[in-house]
Amino acid sequence: MEKGKLLYEGKAKQLFQTNESEVIWVEYLNQATALNGAKKDQIKGKGELNNRITSLIFDYLKSKKIKNHFIKRLSANEQLIQAVEIIPLEVVVRNVAAGSFSKRLAIPEGTSLSLPIVEFYYKKDELDDPMVIDDHILFLQIASTEEIAQLRQLALEVNHALIELFDSIDIQLIDFKLEFGRQKEGSLLLADEVSPDTCRLWDKKTNEHLDKDIYRRDLGDIVPVYQEVLNRLEKRGK
Ligand code: TMP
């Protein structure tokens, strides 16, 4: 497989063409951002940790029959993925109140939700990724009614599988964000990444944050924390 020209540069990853039109070469960067890019830092080791963690989690999801774009990890900070047309929605699943949910509805962080809650956010930096409801998604022609139903269903399936995974390594899955793409024939495929950048993970015994809130809230260094998540995932695999 040959790495071709740069196709897209995001906040945490670069996507490159390859000699196969359906395959994309991803490089995970050391950049960390928060507040829609207003806070930005280079953190040595972050790209490698997220690449390794995402690779393990996407492989695990495959083993649970949840299809996703991951093909294989190439190196410490590179992986191959299947090309899809990304749907500009962030699909957030919440099991426990935290972050923007706690702020918006004045529900204390840590409050268990009786059922998982699925929310959609429109991926549009200029608008600060606003929350959208089904009718907005239809009006903006982002996805069809059937696709919205499928996104909810798939997000809940991922939630079920991830709760089990993290529970087995003494981590409580508070909430997370997913992105999906359309394949050539139109079916939806889980894409992007699943890492401590995109999930809230709390240690089951101590309630310590094992995720990007450490960076967002200036609570310390994320590298040892992400390393701890990777160590637990790798140990589980042995
Ligand atoms: P929130 O509480 O800030 O809405 O975040 C909910 C979850 O989604 C949390 O696990 C962090 C993740 N997330 C992202 O991965 N990217 C984003 O741009 C946002 C806003 C949240």
Image (tube, rainbow, N blue to C red):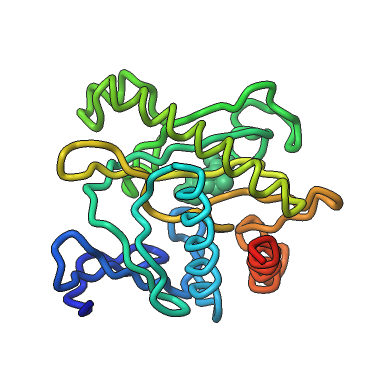
* Foreground residue among 136 and 49: 49
> How many numbered circles does the render carry?
0
Front residue (pair 159, 164)? 164
Up/down of 76 relative to 67, above or below: below
On the image, the x and y values in percent for residue 197 come to 54, 58
Residue 218 in view here: no
> Would residue 130 be found to the left or right of residue 237 on screen?
left
Q: Position of residue 100 (x, y in %)?
A: 58, 38
- Residue 56 in the figure: left or right of residue 205: left
Residue name at image x 37 percent, y 70 percent: 79
Is residue 22 visible to the viewer in this orientation of the structure?
yes
Which residue shows up at 44% across the image and 54% down it? 36
Tell me: residue 71, above or below residue 183: below
Query: In x, y percent, where is residue 6?
Result: 21, 72
Q: Residue at x 30, y 23 (%)?
A: 136
Quarter holding the C terminus?
bottom right
